[in-house]
Amino acid sequence: MLKRNINFLGRRKIALILSSVLLIISIASLAVRGLQLGIDFTGGTLVEVGYPQTADLSVVRNSLNEAGFGDATVQHYGTTKDVLIRLKTHEGISEKELSTKVLEAINKNAAESAQLRRVEFVGPQVGEELAQDGGLALLFSMIGILIYVAWRFEWKFALGSVAALVHDVIITLGLFSIFGLEFDLTVLAAILALIGYSLNDTIVVFDRIRENFRKFRKGSSEEIMNISLNETLSRTILTSFTVVLVLLALAFLGGAIIHNFAIALLFGVFVGTYSSIFVASALALTWGVSAEDLMIPVKEGADIDQMP
Protein backbone atom coordinates (compact mmCIF):
# COMPACT_ATOMS: atom_id res chain seq x y z
CA MET A 1 0.00 0.00 0.00
CA LEU A 2 1.35 3.42 -1.00
CA LYS A 3 2.15 5.61 1.96
CA ARG A 4 1.71 9.35 1.72
CA ASN A 5 4.35 11.60 3.17
CA ILE A 6 2.95 15.10 2.71
CA ASN A 7 4.64 17.67 4.90
CA PHE A 8 1.48 19.45 6.06
CA LEU A 9 2.93 21.07 9.17
CA GLY A 10 6.04 22.16 7.31
CA ARG A 11 3.74 24.56 5.47
CA ARG A 12 1.91 25.75 8.57
CA LYS A 13 3.37 29.27 8.42
CA ILE A 14 2.02 29.77 4.88
CA ALA A 15 -1.34 28.36 5.96
CA LEU A 16 -1.51 30.59 9.03
CA ILE A 17 -0.71 33.64 6.88
CA LEU A 18 -3.52 32.65 4.47
CA SER A 19 -5.92 32.15 7.38
CA SER A 20 -4.94 35.51 8.86
CA VAL A 21 -5.63 37.27 5.55
CA LEU A 22 -9.03 35.58 5.20
CA LEU A 23 -9.92 36.44 8.80
CA ILE A 24 -8.94 40.09 8.34
CA ILE A 25 -11.02 40.37 5.14
CA SER A 26 -13.99 38.65 6.81
CA ILE A 27 -13.87 40.77 9.96
CA ALA A 28 -13.47 43.97 7.92
CA SER A 29 -16.49 43.08 5.77
CA LEU A 30 -18.57 42.18 8.83
CA ALA A 31 -17.60 45.48 10.48
CA VAL A 32 -18.26 47.64 7.41
CA ARG A 33 -21.07 45.87 5.54
CA GLY A 34 -22.45 43.59 8.24
CA LEU A 35 -24.82 40.73 7.45
CA GLN A 36 -27.94 40.97 5.31
CA LEU A 37 -30.29 39.73 7.99
CA GLY A 38 -33.51 38.01 6.97
CA ILE A 39 -36.89 38.86 8.40
CA ASP A 40 -36.35 36.16 11.04
CA PHE A 41 -34.05 38.69 12.71
CA THR A 42 -35.18 42.09 11.41
CA GLY A 43 -38.94 41.51 11.49
CA GLY A 44 -41.34 41.43 8.57
CA THR A 45 -44.30 39.62 7.04
CA LEU A 46 -44.70 36.16 5.51
CA VAL A 47 -47.45 35.76 2.93
CA GLU A 48 -48.26 32.29 1.60
CA VAL A 49 -50.43 31.98 -1.51
CA GLY A 50 -51.59 29.02 -3.60
CA TYR A 51 -52.13 28.70 -7.35
CA PRO A 52 -54.32 26.21 -9.27
CA GLN A 53 -51.33 25.39 -11.49
CA THR A 54 -47.55 25.71 -11.25
CA ALA A 55 -46.63 29.28 -10.33
CA ASP A 56 -44.15 31.27 -12.44
CA LEU A 57 -41.94 32.95 -9.86
CA SER A 58 -40.50 35.44 -12.36
CA VAL A 59 -44.01 36.77 -13.09
CA VAL A 60 -44.73 37.04 -9.36
CA ARG A 61 -41.48 38.95 -8.76
CA ASN A 62 -42.13 41.36 -11.64
CA SER A 63 -45.64 42.05 -10.37
CA LEU A 64 -44.35 42.80 -6.89
CA ASN A 65 -41.61 45.08 -8.28
CA GLU A 66 -44.19 47.07 -10.23
CA ALA A 67 -46.27 47.43 -7.05
CA GLY A 68 -43.31 48.81 -5.08
CA PHE A 69 -42.31 45.62 -3.26
CA GLY A 70 -38.88 45.29 -4.79
CA ASP A 71 -37.36 43.98 -1.54
CA ALA A 72 -39.69 40.95 -1.48
CA THR A 73 -38.24 37.44 -1.52
CA VAL A 74 -40.30 34.97 -3.55
CA GLN A 75 -39.85 31.20 -3.46
CA HIS A 76 -41.75 27.96 -3.82
CA TYR A 77 -42.97 26.52 -0.54
CA GLY A 78 -43.59 22.77 -0.45
CA THR A 79 -44.90 22.39 -4.01
CA THR A 80 -44.58 24.39 -7.21
CA LYS A 81 -48.18 25.56 -6.73
CA ASP A 82 -47.45 27.15 -3.35
CA VAL A 83 -45.50 30.40 -3.10
CA LEU A 84 -44.02 32.03 -0.03
CA ILE A 85 -43.45 35.79 -0.14
CA ARG A 86 -41.19 37.41 2.47
CA LEU A 87 -41.55 41.15 2.98
CA LYS A 88 -39.62 43.47 5.23
CA THR A 89 -41.44 45.76 7.63
CA HIS A 90 -43.35 48.59 5.91
CA GLU A 91 -44.16 51.45 8.26
CA GLY A 92 -47.65 52.85 8.16
CA ILE A 93 -49.20 49.71 6.62
CA SER A 94 -51.00 47.14 8.73
CA GLU A 95 -50.52 43.42 8.26
CA LYS A 96 -53.96 43.04 6.69
CA GLU A 97 -53.47 45.95 4.28
CA LEU A 98 -50.05 44.64 3.29
CA SER A 99 -51.31 41.15 2.49
CA THR A 100 -54.22 42.63 0.51
CA LYS A 101 -51.89 44.80 -1.57
CA VAL A 102 -49.57 41.85 -2.22
CA LEU A 103 -52.46 39.66 -3.34
CA GLU A 104 -53.81 42.38 -5.62
CA ALA A 105 -50.34 42.94 -7.11
CA ILE A 106 -49.60 39.31 -7.96
CA ASN A 107 -53.11 38.73 -9.38
CA LYS A 108 -53.01 41.82 -11.58
CA ASN A 109 -51.00 40.23 -14.41
CA ALA A 110 -51.62 36.58 -13.56
CA ALA A 111 -53.55 34.22 -15.86
CA GLU A 112 -54.96 32.45 -12.81
CA SER A 113 -55.63 34.16 -9.50
CA ALA A 114 -53.77 33.11 -6.38
CA GLN A 115 -55.53 32.37 -3.12
CA LEU A 116 -54.27 33.65 0.21
CA ARG A 117 -53.26 30.76 2.50
CA ARG A 118 -51.75 32.45 5.55
CA VAL A 119 -50.12 35.64 6.78
CA GLU A 120 -47.55 35.74 9.58
CA PHE A 121 -45.91 38.77 11.12
CA VAL A 122 -42.50 38.67 12.84
CA GLY A 123 -41.89 41.68 15.05
CA PRO A 124 -38.48 43.37 15.33
CA GLN A 125 -38.36 42.52 19.05
CA VAL A 126 -38.77 38.81 18.29
CA GLY A 127 -36.07 39.07 15.62
CA GLU A 128 -33.69 40.74 18.08
CA GLU A 129 -34.28 37.97 20.62
CA LEU A 130 -33.61 35.33 17.97
CA ALA A 131 -30.32 37.02 17.07
CA GLN A 132 -29.27 37.12 20.74
CA ASP A 133 -30.27 33.49 21.28
CA GLY A 134 -28.33 32.46 18.18
CA GLY A 135 -25.22 34.26 19.39
CA LEU A 136 -25.52 32.63 22.82
CA ALA A 137 -25.93 29.22 21.17
CA LEU A 138 -22.64 29.73 19.31
CA LEU A 139 -20.89 30.95 22.47
CA PHE A 140 -22.08 28.09 24.68
CA SER A 141 -21.21 25.51 22.04
CA MET A 142 -17.64 26.86 21.91
CA ILE A 143 -17.32 26.75 25.70
CA GLY A 144 -18.66 23.19 25.81
CA ILE A 145 -16.23 22.09 23.10
CA LEU A 146 -13.31 23.72 24.93
CA ILE A 147 -14.15 21.82 28.13
CA TYR A 148 -14.74 18.51 26.32
CA VAL A 149 -11.52 18.54 24.26
CA ALA A 150 -9.44 19.69 27.24
CA TRP A 151 -10.84 16.80 29.30
CA ARG A 152 -10.48 14.17 26.57
CA PHE A 153 -7.11 15.28 25.18
CA GLU A 154 -5.07 18.20 26.49
CA TRP A 155 -5.58 21.95 26.86
CA LYS A 156 -3.27 22.73 23.92
CA PHE A 157 -5.47 20.62 21.67
CA ALA A 158 -8.58 22.25 23.18
CA LEU A 159 -7.37 25.76 22.36
CA GLY A 160 -6.36 24.64 18.87
CA SER A 161 -9.76 23.08 18.16
CA VAL A 162 -11.72 26.09 19.43
CA ALA A 163 -9.46 28.46 17.47
CA ALA A 164 -10.14 26.38 14.35
CA LEU A 165 -13.91 26.54 14.95
CA VAL A 166 -13.82 30.31 15.47
CA HIS A 167 -11.77 30.51 12.27
CA ASP A 168 -14.41 28.50 10.36
CA VAL A 169 -17.36 30.50 11.68
CA ILE A 170 -15.85 33.94 11.03
CA ILE A 171 -14.75 33.09 7.48
CA THR A 172 -18.15 31.56 6.65
CA LEU A 173 -19.94 34.64 8.02
CA GLY A 174 -17.49 36.78 6.05
CA LEU A 175 -18.53 34.99 2.85
CA PHE A 176 -22.17 35.90 3.50
CA SER A 177 -21.20 39.49 4.24
CA ILE A 178 -18.97 39.91 1.17
CA PHE A 179 -21.49 38.45 -1.30
CA GLY A 180 -24.54 39.96 0.40
CA LEU A 181 -26.26 36.60 0.97
CA GLU A 182 -29.26 36.62 3.28
CA PHE A 183 -28.58 35.40 6.80
CA ASP A 184 -31.62 33.78 8.39
CA LEU A 185 -32.39 30.99 10.86
CA THR A 186 -31.57 28.27 8.33
CA VAL A 187 -28.08 29.73 7.88
CA LEU A 188 -27.65 29.94 11.66
CA ALA A 189 -28.57 26.25 11.82
CA ALA A 190 -25.95 25.58 9.13
CA ILE A 191 -23.30 27.40 11.18
CA LEU A 192 -24.10 25.24 14.22
CA ALA A 193 -24.01 22.10 12.03
CA LEU A 194 -20.67 23.27 10.64
CA ILE A 195 -19.25 23.48 14.16
CA GLY A 196 -20.23 19.86 14.77
CA TYR A 197 -18.83 18.67 11.43
CA SER A 198 -15.53 20.51 11.79
CA LEU A 199 -15.10 19.35 15.39
CA ASN A 200 -15.73 15.73 14.41
CA ASP A 201 -13.04 15.96 11.74
CA THR A 202 -10.63 17.55 14.21
CA ILE A 203 -11.30 14.92 16.88
CA VAL A 204 -10.50 12.12 14.40
CA VAL A 205 -7.15 13.77 13.64
CA PHE A 206 -6.41 14.35 17.34
CA ASP A 207 -7.25 10.72 18.17
CA ARG A 208 -4.70 9.49 15.64
CA ILE A 209 -2.09 12.00 16.88
CA ARG A 210 -2.56 10.78 20.47
CA GLU A 211 -2.35 7.16 19.34
CA ASN A 212 0.87 7.75 17.40
CA PHE A 213 2.46 9.76 20.21
CA ARG A 214 2.04 6.69 22.41
CA LYS A 215 3.09 4.30 19.63
CA PHE A 216 6.26 5.96 18.37
CA ARG A 217 9.02 6.50 20.91
CA LYS A 218 11.29 8.29 18.46
CA GLY A 219 10.68 11.27 16.26
CA SER A 220 9.81 14.90 16.84
CA SER A 221 6.29 16.13 17.54
CA GLU A 222 6.08 17.60 14.04
CA GLU A 223 7.08 14.30 12.40
CA ILE A 224 4.58 12.25 14.40
CA MET A 225 1.78 14.74 13.79
CA ASN A 226 2.54 14.73 10.06
CA ILE A 227 2.34 10.94 10.04
CA SER A 228 -1.05 11.16 11.76
CA LEU A 229 -2.38 13.73 9.29
CA ASN A 230 -1.30 11.58 6.35
CA GLU A 231 -2.92 8.49 7.86
CA THR A 232 -6.28 10.23 8.30
CA LEU A 233 -6.15 12.02 4.93
CA SER A 234 -8.07 9.32 3.01
CA ARG A 235 -10.86 9.30 5.58
CA THR A 236 -11.03 13.11 5.56
CA ILE A 237 -11.21 13.33 1.76
CA LEU A 238 -13.83 10.60 1.39
CA THR A 239 -16.03 12.03 4.15
CA SER A 240 -15.82 15.56 2.76
CA PHE A 241 -16.46 14.33 -0.79
CA THR A 242 -19.66 12.50 0.12
CA VAL A 243 -20.93 15.46 2.16
CA VAL A 244 -20.16 17.85 -0.70
CA LEU A 245 -22.15 15.69 -3.16
CA VAL A 246 -25.22 15.91 -0.91
CA LEU A 247 -24.82 19.65 -0.38
CA LEU A 248 -24.43 20.30 -4.11
CA ALA A 249 -27.71 18.50 -4.70
CA LEU A 250 -29.38 20.58 -1.98
CA ALA A 251 -27.91 23.84 -3.32
CA PHE A 252 -29.01 23.31 -6.93
CA LEU A 253 -32.11 21.14 -6.54
CA GLY A 254 -33.39 21.82 -3.04
CA GLY A 255 -35.11 25.10 -3.80
CA ALA A 256 -34.67 28.61 -2.48
CA ILE A 257 -35.74 27.80 1.08
CA ILE A 258 -32.59 25.80 1.87
CA HIS A 259 -30.29 27.27 -0.77
CA ASN A 260 -28.34 29.51 1.63
CA PHE A 261 -28.29 26.70 4.21
CA ALA A 262 -26.57 24.46 1.65
CA ILE A 263 -24.19 27.23 0.55
CA ALA A 264 -23.11 27.89 4.15
CA LEU A 265 -22.43 24.21 4.80
CA LEU A 266 -20.80 23.67 1.40
CA PHE A 267 -18.31 26.47 1.96
CA GLY A 268 -17.93 25.49 5.61
CA VAL A 269 -16.98 21.90 4.75
CA PHE A 270 -14.00 23.12 2.72
CA VAL A 271 -12.95 25.60 5.39
CA GLY A 272 -13.49 23.06 8.19
CA THR A 273 -11.44 20.37 6.45
CA TYR A 274 -8.64 22.87 5.86
CA SER A 275 -8.72 24.11 9.47
CA SER A 276 -8.56 20.59 10.94
CA ILE A 277 -5.19 20.12 9.27
CA PHE A 278 -3.63 23.54 9.03
CA VAL A 279 -5.15 25.42 11.97
CA ALA A 280 -6.06 23.10 14.85
CA SER A 281 -3.04 20.79 14.51
CA ALA A 282 -0.66 23.61 13.60
CA LEU A 283 -1.64 25.70 16.62
CA ALA A 284 -1.33 22.70 18.97
CA LEU A 285 2.19 22.14 17.62
CA THR A 286 3.01 25.86 17.93
CA TRP A 287 1.95 25.78 21.58
CA GLY A 288 4.36 22.91 22.20
CA VAL A 289 2.25 19.75 22.44
CA SER A 290 4.43 16.68 22.91
CA ALA A 291 4.25 12.97 23.66
CA GLU A 292 4.61 13.66 27.39
CA ASP A 293 1.35 15.62 27.37
CA LEU A 294 -0.62 12.60 26.14
CA MET A 295 1.05 9.72 27.96
CA ILE A 296 -1.15 7.71 30.31
CA PRO A 297 0.03 8.45 33.86
CA VAL A 298 1.43 5.41 35.65
CA LYS A 299 -0.20 4.78 38.98
CA GLU A 300 2.28 4.59 41.81
CA GLY A 301 2.52 1.03 43.14
CA ALA A 302 0.68 -0.44 40.13
CA ASP A 303 3.35 -3.13 39.72
CA ILE A 304 2.97 -4.22 43.32
CA ASP A 305 -0.83 -4.40 43.00
CA GLN A 306 -0.50 -6.78 40.04
CA MET A 307 1.83 -9.19 41.91
CA PRO A 308 0.28 -12.50 43.04
Image (cartoon, helix red, strand yellow):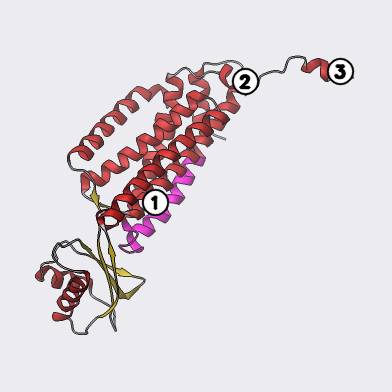
Q: Which mark is residue 189?
A: 1
In this rendering, the label closer to the viewer, 1 or 2: 1
Secondary structure type for disc 1: helix
Residue closest to the eye, 233 or 100: 100
Residue 288 visible in the displayed image: yes
First reached walking from the N terminus: tag 3 or tag 1: 1
Q: Residue 66 at what x, y percent from top left?
A: 9, 70
Q: What are the residue bounds of the magenta stretch?
A: 235-259
Residue 277: % across, % down: 43, 32
The reply to whether the C-beta atoms of the residues labelled 3 and 1 are less than 8 Å apart is no
Crowd band around label 1 with a 10 angstrom C-alpha radius: few (<14), some (14–19), many (20+): some
Q: CA distance from mark 2 to mark 3?
A: 24 Å
In the picture shown, does residue 183 fall above or below 150? below
Residue shown at the point (14%, 62%) measured from the top left: 91
Instruction: Give the residue number, with chain letter if any, for mark 2.
Output: 295
**258 relative to 230, above or below:** below
**Residue 283's disc number:** none
**Quadrant assignment for the C terminus:** top right
Magenta highlight: main SS? helix
Q: Which residue is mark 3?
A: 307
- Please name the residue shown 44% across and 19% down the image: 287
Looking at the image, residue 282 sits to the left or right of residue 108; the answer is right
- Label 3 CA crowd tier, 10 Å (few <14, some 14–19, many 20+): few
